[in-house]
Each structure stands twice: as structure tokens, then as C-alpha cells.
Amino acid sequence: MDALLAALADPARWRLVNLLAERPRPVGVLAQLAEARQPQTTKHLQTLERAGVVTSQRAGQRRIYALRPGPLRDLAAELSRIADSAERDSGPHATYDRYERSLHAERFAAKESGWVDGRSFTFHRSLTGRPELVWRHLTEAVLLAHWWTPEDLRVSELVFEARPGGRIVQEYRDAEDSDGSHPVAGRAEGVVDDVRPGERLAYRLSPLLPDGRLAFTAHVDMDLGPTDTGTDLDVHWRITDSTIDSADFIAGIEIGFGQSLDKLAAILDADSHDTDSADSIDTRSMK
């Protein structure tokens, strides 16, 4: 496939492919139609033949070249697969497009300091696991680090002191920056306001702009309630102290924190299945 792509990337060779798509032709005619010298045309045809997209045969004093449709169909199928993958309704490209639309709207609205103060965001998730377990994932740094970023990011530094007045530090990098060689994608700092284990958690968190200033302050309230199947988690964000430069952050709250909560739900669900499997094995071993 690489050789085929390289062969087709040259405009002169692409012209020859189109001419051969009409019918097989000898080198001399192809050179004439392509308005090129015959030695150059021969070299281009040889490249296309090595790539498997054309074939040739000697006919008297002439060499006739013909197009092989198979490799082009294979390439078309691969390109179609790539395009279909990019157009998935719930895939990363759809999220990128959604964020881009939000970004344009927020940048247009950000005219002065305080432009978005008072805006709120609400999230709800019905989670597998009792409130005590969910609480651990909300407050213990080693567990929090597994879900407290959107899909394309990873936590690179995390401090979460789950007590009133406790310090919060969240630094994150691109998920594929495994060795930390790329610039930090973002950093936020905050403080814990209210802690009621298994029931309620409240904190303030402020993303930092590149120059170290606060972009805005998010007042985050999390309420946990037991259900028959686990825990209902209700989250409320309220924005204050917003700067003009906070638009890029504001545009990503609904998408980004929603993805984080989805990761939390998936982790708890997987833990539940693992526990059920282990219990089944233990039950069978006792018989």
C-alpha cells in the first residue's frame, strides 16, 4: 500500500493512470498525450508497474501498458474504511467537531472579565458500587488519577487532600505522551470546602493560564445517594472569576468532565464484573 500511495502521489503518474483508465496504450502515445518526453514517461510507468497498479507486455516494437483495477479498488476500500472510522457518531472526531463548535461560540462571547460568571453545568451518573466505594474513587488520589481527565489526556501530577481546607493540584498531559517529553497540557489548583464521606464533596478548582493566572474558578458540588443497584452521583459546577482568556477552558467543561465521569462509570462497572466473577469462582470451589 505504501508503494502504491507513493507512486500515485506524483501528478505526472496520476495523469498516466487516468489515461490508462480509458484503455491500454503504448509508451509513445502516453508520452504524447501527457505532453512529456518518452524516457520520463517510461520511468513513471516502470514505477507504477513496480507498485502493481499497471502491467505491460511487448507487442512487436511497442510496449503496451494497461491499468490493473484491483489495487485501486483495494486502496479505495481502505480510504473508505478510514473515512468511516473518522465519521463515527460517537468517535473522537465527532467530539473534536463538537468542541470546535463550542469553542467558536465561547470565544465570541468572551468580551470582558466575568463574562461567564454564574453559568452552571450539571451532570448525573448512575454508578455501579455502593457510595463508600464511589467515595474512594472521588477522593483517593491513586484511584482519582485513573478517571479524572477526558479521554485524550492523562493525569501527570495529582494532589487531593480530602479534608476541609485540603489542597488540590491536578496536572495533565496528552494521553500518548508516555515519557512526559511534551509540554504540560494543563494544570489546575484548588481547595476542598466540604467533606461528608459517602454523601457530599465540595471543592473549588481553578485552571491556570499559560502565564500562571487563574482562568476561572469552578465551584464543584458532588452529592452521592444509594440506590438498589449502586450510587447516584449528581455533580453541579458553578463558574466565578472568569477571565476573557478562559473561553477555551469553558468550551471543554461539558464534554471533558462528561468523558471523565464516563471513565469513572466504566471503571466501577469493570470492578463489579471482576468481583462477581471472583465470587462465582469462590462459590464453585466450596462445592
Image (cartoon, grey):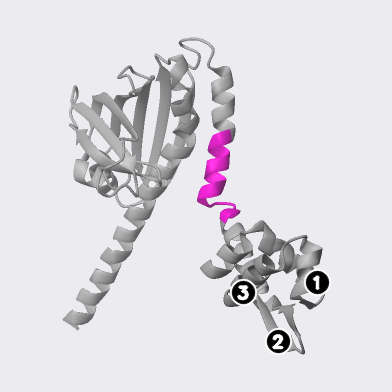
| Percent of width and height locating residue 271 | 29, 59
Which amino acid type is shown beneath numbered disc 2? Gln
Say whether residue 126 is magenta. no
- Residue 148: image x %, image y %? 32, 41
Locate residue 217: give its quadrant: top left
Q: Residue furthest bottom?
A: 60
Residue that numbered label 2 is attached to:
57
At mark 2, the secondary structure is: strand
Amino acid marked by disc 3: Gln
Q: Main secondary structure of the magenta part?
A: helix
Distance from disc 3 to disc 2, alpha carbons, whole Å, reads: 12 Å
Residue receiving disc 1: 29
Question: Could you tell me which secondary element the residue under label 3 belongs to?
Answer: helix
Distance from the alpha carbon under mark 2 to that under mark 1 = 15 Å
Quadrant the N terminus occupies = bottom right
The Cα atoms of the two marked residues, 1 and 3, are separated by 16 Å
Query: Is 199 positioned to the left or the right of 259 in the image?
Result: left
Question: Can residue 132 be spotted in the picture?
Answer: no
Residue 224 pos. (x, y %): 34, 39
Picture residue at 57% right of the left edge, 76% below the top: 50
- Which residue does the numbered mark 3 point to in the structure image? 46
Q: Residue 35 sits in which quadrant?
A: bottom right
